[in-house]
Image (tube, rainbow, N blue to C red):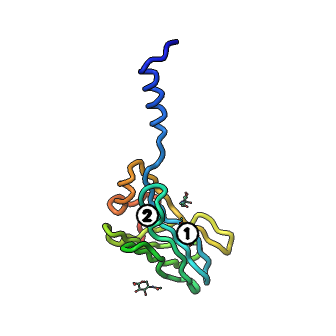
Amino acid sequence: MQFTASTLLLAGATFLSTASAAGVFAINGTAQPGSHVTLTVLNGNVGDNPTCNGTAAIGDLPASGNITCNALYALSFIWDTQNDGISATYSTPSAAPFTYSVPPTSNDGTTYVFGFEDDFADAEASKQFTANPPKSAVEFRA
Ligand SMILES: *[C@@H]1O[C@H](CO)[C@@H](O)[C@H](O)[C@H]1NC(C)=O
Ligand SMILES: *[C@@H]1O[C@H](CO)[C@@H](O)[C@H](O)[C@H]1NC(C)=O
Ligand SMILES: *[C@@H]1O[C@H](CO)[C@@H](O)[C@H](O)[C@H]1NC(C)=O
């Protein structure tokens, strides 16, 4: 069989169709009642540094606090009940504060794990999340 240009183009198109996510919006964390909440926000291109990433000391539940972010970004949280998600209010230089319910994913009775992640084929789409909130994090606080 003779190799033709169209054979090579077909092989190339098949390879490109498996392209992975270019953008990501994720809020993930771990927490212990009476101790701390750690949250990380990925909001931009895959591989970018987090926009927010930090740990806040907390007392007994219900607890609230703020997490360190890059300049002009902000993240605060409310954790009412250990078996429920964390309510996380996030804002960016271009988006007003928006509150997400970050769902619980697992716990060992001491450490509680939370998180959602939405991947986007278009990196820009991951930065416009407030116009199209991730379906995995239904808003439950105004
Ligand atoms: C978040 O901060 C912690 C503590 O400083 C650090 O160990 C971790 O690598 C950071 N995470 C990311 C994704 O940069
Ligand atoms: C979080 O930040 C807000 C705004 O700066 C402040 O009013 C609030 O007291 C902070 N909360 C905690 C628990 O530090
Ligand atoms: C965030 O949590 C979700 C749900 O457990 C998980 O699928 C995703 O991989 C996590 N993302 C990161 C960056 O840890």
Q: Position of residue 74 (x, y in %)?
A: 40, 74
Q: Give whichever of 35, 2 is nearer the camera.
A: 2
Q: In the image, 47: left or right of 127?
A: right
Ligand 3 is within 8 Å of the C-beta of the residue at disc 1? no
Relative to 114, residue 118 above or below:
above
Residue that numbered label 2 is attached to: 138
Q: Position of residue 48 (x, y in %)?
A: 46, 60
Q: Position of residue 24 (x, y in %)?
A: 45, 56
- The image quarter containing residue 75 is bottom left
The numbered dot on residue 110 is none
The residue under the point 47% across, 55% down is 46
Relative to 15, residue 33 above or below:
below
Q: In the image, 84: left or right of 7?
A: right
Q: Give SS at disc 1.
A: strand
How many numbered circles are shown?
A: 2
Mark 1 to mark 2 CA distance (whole Å): 17 Å
Residue that numbered label 1 is attached to: 29
Q: In the image, 134: left or right of 107?
A: left
- The image quarter containing residue 124 is bottom left
Looking at the rendering, in which quadrant would you find the C terminus? bottom left
The residue under the point 57% across, 86% down is 59
Q: Who comes first in sequence, dot 1 or dot 2? A: 1
Q: Give whichever of 114, 18 is nearer the camera.
A: 18
The residue under the point 58% across, 63% down is 105
For ligand 3, the image quadrant comes to bottom right
- The image quarter containing residue 94 is bottom left
Amino acid tagged 1 = Gly
Q: Residues within 10 Å of mark 2 (few under 14, many from 20)?
A: few
